[in-house]
Amino acid sequence: MRPRIELDADEIIDSHTHCGGFLLSNLLLESYPYSQDTLDLVRKMQSNKVKFSICFPFPIANGFCESFTPELYNRLLVKEVKSFGKDLLLPFAYIRLDDTLQRQLGCLEQLFNDFPFYGVKLYPHCDKYYICDKEIEEPLTTFLLAYDFPVIVHSSFEGYGNPGIILDFARKHPNIRVTLAHASRFLTSAFLEIKNLQNVFLDCSPLNMLCEVMRNAAKKKRYEIENFSFDKPEKVLYQLATIFPDKLLWGSDSPCSFLTNFSDNAVVEFSEKYTYEADIRVLRSLPHKYIKQIANKNTLRFLFG
Ligand SMILES: [Zn+2]
């Protein structure tokens, strides 16, 4: 049901992109971006010689509006991928961790008859549930194991998406491949553990903005953060690739490669630094052997085991 993908060892997979629906929280907060045109994503990939992208819908906060559901977003994703991204986009299903989980899983099983999915994306920080909550963990793991689906989990410094909880989950389920998105926020405690867990990966998306976020977080000294040169994304990527040669996945997080908040004047000026091309440039600054690892080999192992 999930065909293996064909690509050469030199070709690139982007492990983290979004399409399908709106990022409603950004829209309401008057922040940008709040959507991505799938055709535009495909154009970016083609002009930058990216062969495949893993893509998934944006999250919808629970209780926001009954008409906006994960089911709707997953359906839109399938329609978009089928129409515009066949043989280019690898859809991951969006599952919201809440009391409608069983209903969502039932709908996904139906949708799988229509189109192959390659994994699952979770956003615990939006859902206000921990991945290890009993009512979540059991049905979710049964589902992931039944389809041999890998899972990408949005990581946050603390709260529902903190890396400690995601790693607890990964340790308990060694047969489920788990990626901590956003480099597990470079938290020292997470870095120590990730090395020892065979089934765990981490992505570095969106590297340029993530470095900016980390520079600010490091200044505040609220968390124990690994010592990286966050003002030099190329250096950060090289360091990550050498620490985690078999675990790091390259991803752009397109279109969330930057964030502009229009409403409180905290406008991050859009610069050349935040384009898809800039992401690719940083990737291509790596020695060739690392590009092959983080944008191809590791991603294939994450996808297919
Ligand atoms: Zn993302």
Image: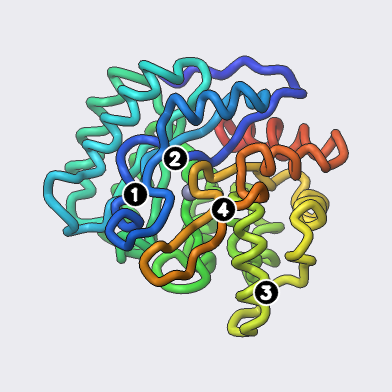
Numbered disc 4: secondary structure:
loop
Tag 3: amino acid: Ile
Numbered disc 3: secondary structure:
loop
Give residue 270's mark. Answer: 4
58 with respect to 305 (left or right):
left
Residues tagged 1 and 2 counted as in contact (Cβ below 8 A): yes
CA gap, disc 3 to disc 4? 27 Å
Eye-nearest disc, 1 or 3: 1
CA gap, disc 4 to disc 1? 19 Å
Counting residues from the start of the chain, the first of labels 2 and 3 encountered is 2
Counting residues from the start of the chain, the first of labels 3 and 4 encountered is 3
Residue ID for mark 1: 23
Give residue 225's mark. Answer: 3
Q: Residues within 10 Å of mark 3 (few under 14, many from 20)?
A: some
Eye-nearest disc, 2 or 3: 2
Tag 4: amino acid: Phe
Q: Position of residue 150 (x, y in %)?
A: 49, 39
Numbered disc 1: secondary structure:
loop
Counting residues from the start of the chain, the first of labels 4 and 1 encountered is 1
Numbered disc 2: secondary structure:
strand
Q: Nearer the viewer, residue 241 or 196?
A: 241
Counting residues from the start of the chain, the first of labels 1 and 3 encountered is 1
Tag 1: amino acid: Leu
Residue ID for mark 2: 18
